[in-house]
Every structure is written in structure tokens, then in C-alpha cells.
Image: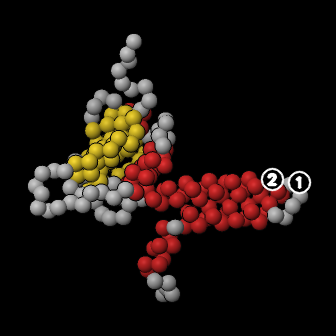
Amino acid sequence: MSFIRPELSAALWRWREVGAGAALAALGAWTATRGGYLLVPLGLALMALGVGWTLTAWRRLRFRQEGEAPGILRVTEAQIAYYGPRVGGFVGLPDLSEIRLLTLRGRRIWKLKQADGQLLHIPVEAEGAEALFDAFATLPGIDMAALVAALGTDAPASDARVIALAEVDRLIWARPGQGILRA
């Protein structure tokens, strides 16, 4: 029997990493105030580590999207695998050339493009999609703040009366060095 409501328990569990980072930063600040040649640098180092952890956890929390979408996503050894009910596929992180965030009929979808032109579409709310945060963070030159900010913007409201597919396609990242060279 639990004395905490399930909704509150779920919210606390979701914010656990942010709280742990903030607690580490507070411990570092407390340690730095104890003084001395050893405790001040140690406390400042712990505080910097805690602030960095809190910032990363905050971004990871904002990256995780609520809702349900079909399919399961797994990231294993630099390979993204999406198993959907109708479509699915694999893409290796070294082969990834472009990441786009597509909004189609009010649903947001990751559009991953390989160097050979093959595409993999993954719903943002798919099970396991939060693992993409760490996978995307390894890509060269990616701006994680811009990635999280793109997810934070609301998708345009879909109107059931409109039959045409209103599509919003946002480029999030492209592999450096891709494109045409001009002399």
C-alpha cells in the first residue's frame, strides 16, 4: 500500500534525474562553504558537475514526449532500430546524414536520412524514443538545445475537415561536409 498518489509518484519518478543533479550541485555548494584548500576546489568541482548534470537531465526531460504512438525503438551499438506495425527499419549513426522533425496531420515524426538516401520515419512518442537523445548527442556538430527547442514548439493544430496533408518539415541537423563543392 502506497501513501503517495500514483500521479505524484509518476511525476517524481520522471523528475528524479533533475533532482539528483540539483542535489549534487547543492552538496557541492555546501562543501565549498566549509573552506580549506581541499574542500573549496572539491566543492566547486561537485557543484559544476551537478549543474551540468541538471542541465542535461532537464534537456532529456524536455526531449521525452508524452503520448502513445505505434512501434518500438531500440538504440544498440550506434544503430537505431524502429519496429513499427506497418513500417520499420534500421539506420546506423555513422551513416546518418540528416535529421528532420516532420509534422504530419498534427503528429510529429523523426525523419532520419542515410547517406544513400534511404529514410526512416519514427514517431516522436514511440516507445523507447527517449533513447534518441543520447544517440543524437553523439553526432558531430549537433546543437542539442536547438533540438530540444524544436520539440518544445507546438505542432500546428490539425483540422479534421482539411483533407490535404499539411506538412511542416524542419531541418534539425545535417552531417558537416555534405553538399556540393564550388570552386
Left-right relation of 139 to 24: left
Left-right relation of 172 to 88: right
Residue at horizontal 28 percent and vertical 31 percent from the top: 117
Amino acid type, label 1:
Tyr
Residue underneath mark 2? 41
Residue 174 position by quadrant: top left
How are the residues colored? Answer: secondary structure
Residue 42 position by quadrant: bottom right
Residue underneath mark 1? 37
Q: Are marks 1 and 2 in contact (CB under 8 Å)?
A: yes
| Above/below status of 174 relative to 17 | above
Quarter holding the C terminus?
top left
- The image shows residue 154 at horizontal and vertical percentages of 33, 58
Q: How many marks?
A: 2
Residue 54 position by quadrant: bottom right
Q: Secondary structure at mark 2?
A: helix
* Mark 1 nearby-residue class (10 Å; few <14, some 14–19, many ≥20): few
Amino acid type, label 2:
Pro
